[in-house]
């Protein structure tokens, strides 16, 4: 692409374009913003510089060296590949999101071009500043960030291949006989529903979470202290809604094998503790008491960290929802032979034996809940599919002494000694 601003027609074409796939339209992984929000404010002010761009201006070009990353303070950008005659729009980014971080983290050329769609206000962090950030903050490990970068770059790389496969499938189904055309129509409706979820629910939820993180990072200390609990409540609610939407989307993908796992060695004990800590407002208020039993030296599990984290979140949310005031929710992890066993136990009303397998089905409802609320819904269906995709098992049994419920799932442990 030439080093120039877009003309009015090119800019209008970009604004009217949609991403080539629903996957490419997802916001970037929010871990980077969460980590930046924890960094000392004086350091952030030293390494960040403000930059303004007019609509149509190119922030950086595909193939250029990655010398800086950018946080979007106001306005929107398009992430584009190819030339201006036939550009491929990978996605749009808005306030609270990051662009350019992949090339900075990997030391690689830019994988795409970023163009301002609206008057743009950016916070720029150059490579030396980012290096200072890594060196000064123990919470930001270079290996973790490089892993995140590789996953994001991989998602962008498969976008064009996915679009091409979709076009080829559309040409093939044109000749199908009547019965197969009906199946195709059902598949199309399901895909349109998934796209609706991604575009109309997922992205706004991601934007809400990003804006809350930006407020935590940039508000004056006195304002942050006065409104800290409100920000925590908003962040927790946005995260819970995001898990619900992700579960709805992943149930169909896991059933058809269209959701490949991103496997890494994960400390499931640490993951369980983090999921438990996300409910700290519940534990602090005392409506439901919480216990987390995670011994040291459990070792690791090779798993998709994001999906297992969501399994834990769903099980803990359900336990809190069905535990009456003054009750207790217990999260525990233990290593048994070749398996890691994770359990979430509540002191709620329990689940009848004849319904314990049924609740893991899509849109399942307990008999006592029918006519009142939906019961466990898609959350447990996602949990079953996600755990089984890892070669594990999941079930529910009575709690200690026969009261309440104990949800248990297992995952194969990573080979090698416990560390």
Image (cartoon, helix red, strand yellow):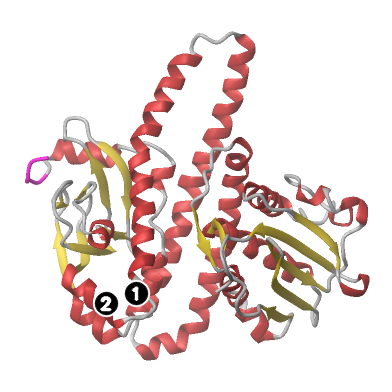
Measuring from the top left, give residue 96's x and y in whole percent: 34, 64
Q: Quadrant of residue 297?
A: bottom right
Circle nearer the viewer, 1 or 2: 2
**Residue 140 picture quarter:** bottom left
Residue corresponding to mark 2: 133
Image location (x, y in percent) of residue 351:
87, 60
Q: Which mark is residue 132?
A: none
Callouts 1 and 2 close, C-beta under 8 Å: yes
The magenta segment is 1-5
Indicate the position of residue 27 as horizontal and vertical percent values. Answer: 40, 54
Decide which of 247, 64 is in the foreground and name it. Answer: 64
Which quadrant of the rendered structure holds the N terminus?
Answer: top left
For the point 38% across and 73% down, the residue is: 35
Q: Residue furthest left?
A: 3
Up/down of 269 relative to 220, above or below: above
Above or below, 97 relative to 90: below
Q: Which residue is mark 1?
A: 36
Left or right: where 188 falls relative to 348: left
């Amino acid at each position: 692409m030439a080093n120039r601003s877009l003309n009015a027609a090119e800019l209008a074409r970009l604004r009217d374009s949609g991403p080539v796939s629903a996957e490419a339209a997802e916001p970037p992984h929010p871990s980077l913003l969460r980590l930046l929000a924890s960094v000392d404010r004086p350091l952030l002010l030293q390494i960040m510089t403000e930059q303004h761009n007019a609509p149509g201006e190119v922030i950086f070009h595909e193939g250029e060296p990655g010398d800086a990353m950018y946080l979007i303070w106001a306005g929107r950008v398009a992430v584009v590949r190819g030339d201006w005659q036939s550009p491929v729009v990978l996605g749009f980014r808005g306030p609270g999101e990051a662009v350019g971080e992949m090339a900075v983290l990997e030391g690689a050329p830019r994988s795409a071009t970023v163009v301002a769609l609206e008057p743009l206000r950016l916070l720029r962090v150059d490579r030396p500043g980012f290096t200072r950030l890594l060196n000064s903050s123990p919470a930001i490990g270079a290996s973790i960030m490089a892993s995140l970068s590789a996953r994001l770059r991989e998602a962008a790389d498969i976008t064009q291949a996915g679009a091409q496969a979709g076009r080829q499938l559309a040409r093939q189904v044109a000749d199908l006989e009547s019965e197969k055309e009906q199946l195709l129509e059902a598949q199309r409706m399901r895909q349109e529903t998934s796209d609706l979820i991604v575009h109309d629910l997922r992205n706004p939820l991601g934007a809400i979470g990003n804006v809350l993180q930006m407020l935590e990072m940039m508000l004056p200390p006195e304002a942050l202290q006065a409104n800290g609990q409100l920000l925590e409540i908003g962040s927790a609610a946005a995260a819970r809604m995001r898990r619900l939407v992700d579960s709805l989307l992943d149930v169909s993908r896991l059933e058809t094998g269209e959701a490949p796992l991103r496997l890494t060695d994960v400390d499931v004990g640490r993951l369980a503790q983090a999921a438990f800590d996300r409910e700290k407002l519940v534990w602090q208020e005392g409506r439901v008491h919480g216990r987390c039993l995670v011994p040291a030296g459990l070792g690791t599990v090779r798993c998709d960290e994001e999906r297992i984290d969501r399994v834990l979140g769903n099980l803990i949310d359900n336990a809190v929802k069905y535990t009456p005031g003054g009750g207790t929710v217990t999260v525990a992890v233990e290593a048994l032979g070749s398996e890691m066993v994770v359990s979430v136990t509540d002191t709620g009303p329990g689940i009848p034996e004849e319904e314990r397998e049924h609740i893991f089905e899509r849109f399942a409802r307990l008999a006592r809940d029918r006519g009142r609320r939906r019961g466990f819904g898609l959350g447990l269906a996602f949990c079953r599919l996600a755990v089984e995709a890892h070669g594990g098992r999941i079930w529910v049994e009575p709690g200690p002494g026969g009261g309440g419920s104990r949800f248990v799932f297992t995952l194969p442990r990573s080979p090698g000694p416990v560390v």
